[in-house]
Image: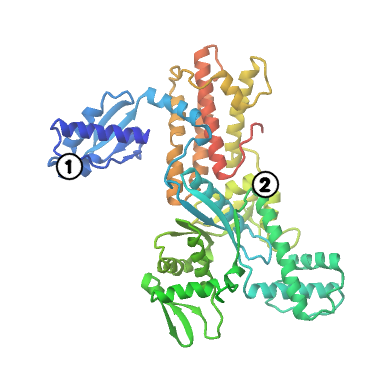
Amino acid sequence: MKDTLRTLVADAIAGAIDAGELRLGAVPEVEIERPRDPAHGDWATNVALKSAKAAGTSPRAVADVIAARVAGHPDVAGVEVAGPGFINLRLSESALRRQVALVREAADDWGRVDLGHGRRVQVEFVSANPVGPLHVGHGRWAALGDSLAAILAHAGWQVEREFYVNDAGVQMDIFAKSVAARYLELCGRTTTFEPEWYQGAYIAEIAREIYEAEGVCWLDATPQAREDYFREKAYAQVLAHLRQVLHGMGVDFDVWFSERTLHMQGADGLTEVQRAIGQLAAKGYIYDLDGAVWFRSTDFGDDKDRVLLKADGEYTYFAADIAYHKDKFERGFDRVINIWGADHHGYVPRMKAAVAALGYPGQLDVVIGQLVTLLRNGEVVRMSKRTGEMVTFEELLDEVGADAARYFFLRRSTDQPLDFDIGLAKEQSSDNPVFYVQYAHARICSILRKAVGLAADADIDAAAAAARLAPIGTSLDALQDPAEFALIRKLAEFPEVVEFAAELLAPHKLPYYAEDLAGAFHQFYTLCRVVTDDVALTAARIALVDATRLTLERVLALVGVSAPERM
């Protein structure tokens, strides 16, 4: 409808120019937006204000000409000029009814927009160190990344999900030493456990799994051989566990990228890290100072230059990250989106500087996910009942389920800390937002099944029931009630919500829309009986509730939450 009205206004301007009513050299770009106050209409345009100077007259005079030509169109019930020259448009009842048919015809494609035009985008998220369990912050980033990927795909992008496995560096050595020490303890040998080693109970669990599978065979090995083996064994166990937990949330990655590969020598004797630095050097962005190698990140807006190779010959994490992003873009992505934790906020300018220096300015977006505080009925939860340590994401998932976890993680903007109330997430009442939305979908399915049950088939699914009672093409002329039109108006917003969420990388817009839509449906259902003695009215309302079902199903799919037919 937005595109239809944009074309309608543009055609009105073109007609006015041809008739000599407006002195414009060309039709200006027409922007159509929803007014802040619904009382002002369904849509509004400021094109008269933007083109008045070129037309040599006042904005209201331009607006009056356009409004006169738009008035009377079958999709427009009313048009008025407001304020300094805004044009407010109110849709006709026939145009609103047509939205119901559009939803049902589009089905799973309802809400699709074409922002990406088939271009490729990579979304990299979670990327936890493979040395321990996922914390609840990782869960928030998993929900955010997976939903964002789904939204971008619905907005016309070719999307690839990637997990960057930080399997190189000092943390892996510490991990190996930690597991080896706990293994030796199980073998009865006294060990020294350094304060900086990983202390969690999960380390002992990993060591016990190795001990129970392999016994004491590593007891007399050299410390280096033992740690090398335990590093790989424990790393594989943790990585497999991460995959399992994320899959349990419905999050699966297309690519698991190993950081180690960036440090492996190729046929030319160089690593990917060395090649990346060499590329920057060839462009003049590298210099030596005090025995270290520096990147001129200030050339691209960073507050200071950054070290890539330290004086002791060790590469920085930043150097590996540059090589990693070089690899990303060389794989053919038009755009890269990283989702990082709040502790990486200061890292963003240097990474964008490096990507620009590599030749991809403006093609990297970074979304910062703020931290999560767990609550139970309003009280802060800090420790796991099982281990006495932090509550892991897996434990949270086990307690509240994937649907509630994903929905609650997405419900607040990523730039804000999140209070996650476990008690509320488990509550089966309208106070629980995910239950409220899912219940609306289940209620619709129940209405459709019962409607068909009147004709003899109680077990038919909701989609088939709607198709039988109100096939595509069913007349919607019987829809007259204000509650019906309020619900239709909310349905019609879905493509805009998808577009907004995709443009601003803001998946939190979807849960709020889902709740508004569920509220509009519940209000409609309170005021309008669906199955009546009027056959035409019943069919039209069946079509409307089916369009609502399809929209709820689609928005929940983009959030990554199920749409149950029974609750």
Kindly identify which residue carries mark 1.
52
Q: In the rendered structure, which amino acid carries the disc numbered 1? A: Ala
Few, some or many residues within 10 Å of mark 2 (<14, 14–19, 20+)? some
Query: Could you tell me which secondary element the residue under label 1 belongs to?
Result: helix
Few, some or many residues within 10 Å of mark 1 (<14, 14–19, 20+)? many
- In three-dimensional space, the C-alpha distance between marks 1 and 2, rounded to whole angstroms, equals 57 Å
Quadrant position of the N terminus in the picture: top left
Quadrant position of the C terminus in the picture: top right
**The one of 14 and 331 positioned closer to us in this rendering:** 331
* Percent coordinates x, y for residue 459 in the rendering: 69, 23
Q: Which label is found at residue 394?
A: none
Report how many numbered discs are placed on residues in the image: 2
Query: In the rendered image, is residue 377 in sight?
Result: no
Chain-order first, disc 1 or disc 2: 1
- Outermost residue to the bottom: 290
* Percent coordinates x, y for residue 296 in the rendering: 40, 76
Q: In the rendered structure, which amino acid carries the disc numbered 2? A: Gly
Q: Is residue 389 left or right of residue 373?
A: right
* Percent coordinates x, y for residue 224 in the rendering: 75, 80
Residue at the (32%, 33%) spot, across then down: 5
Residue at the (46%, 66%) spot, across then down: 348
Query: In the rendered image, is residue 29 in sight?
Result: yes
CB under 8 Å between discs 1 and 2: no
Kindly identify which residue carries mark 2.
401
Query: Could you tell me which secondary element the residue under label 2 belongs to?
Result: loop
Residue at the (87%, 73%) spot, across then down: 216
* Percent coordinates x, y for residue 539 in the rendering: 52, 18
**Vertical relation: 30 (above or below) 396:** above
